[in-house]
Amino acid sequence: MNIRLLLISLLSLLSILLIGCKARPEESDLVRVKEHFLQMRFQAAFRPELQSKSDLELFLLSCEQNRVRCDPLLEMLKEKDRPFYDALKGVPAAKK
């Protein structure tokens, strides 16, 4: 009986996790991840484990630490803040 209850609990937890993985990031997620990224970028000068990482790697790490799917967030960033997105991707700024 206890094993059955345990299996039901595990399946319920797994289904909740899978449903959560399908959620699309929102504007608040973008703001939170960007702020966290900027903090990590500043700290990279003082933290050896961050020093060798590129801006994009730091942004991906920020997504991971904030438990946000990064691909849809990058698409959102591309639409809403193109200069920031281009800087992450290493695209040189256009000359005026």
Image (tube, rainbow, N blue to C red):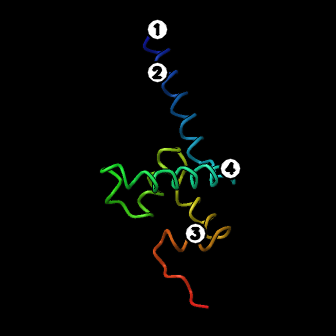
**x, y percent for residue 72:** 58, 60
Mark 4 and mark 2 lie on one chain; the one further toward the N terminus is: 2
Single out the mark in the foreground, 4 or 3: 3
Q: CA distance from mark 4 to mark 2?
A: 35 Å
Task: Tell me if mark 1 has few (under 14), some (14-19) or many (20+) residues whose alpha carbon lies within 10 angstroms of its own.
Answer: few
Tell me the amino acid under the disc marked 1. Answer: Met
Secondary structure type for disc 2: helix
Task: Tell me if mark 2 has few (under 14), some (14-19) or many (20+) residues whose alpha carbon lies within 10 angstroms of its own.
Answer: few
Q: Which mark is residue 28?
A: 4
Tell me the amino acid under the disc marked 3. Answer: Phe
Quadrant in which residue 93 is drawn: bottom right
Please name the residue shown 53% across and 28% down the image. Answer: 13
Task: Tell me if mark 3 has few (under 14), some (14-19) or many (20+) residues whose alpha carbon lies within 10 angstroms of its own.
Answer: some
Q: CA distance from mark 4 to mark 1?
A: 44 Å
- The quadrant of the image that shows the C terminus is bottom right
- Which residue is label 2 attached to? 7
Please name the residue shown 31% across and 60% down the image. Answer: 52
Please name the residue shown 68% across and 49% down the image. Answer: 28
Mark 4 and mark 1 lie on one chain; the one further toward the N terminus is: 1
**x, y percent for residue 20:** 59, 41
Q: Which mark is residue 1?
A: 1
Single out the mark in the foreground, 3 or 2: 3
Secondary structure type for disc 1: loop
Left or right for 80, reference 41: right
Q: CA distance from mark 1 to mark 3?
A: 55 Å
Q: Which mark is residue 84?
A: 3
Q: CA distance from mark 4 to mark 3?
A: 17 Å
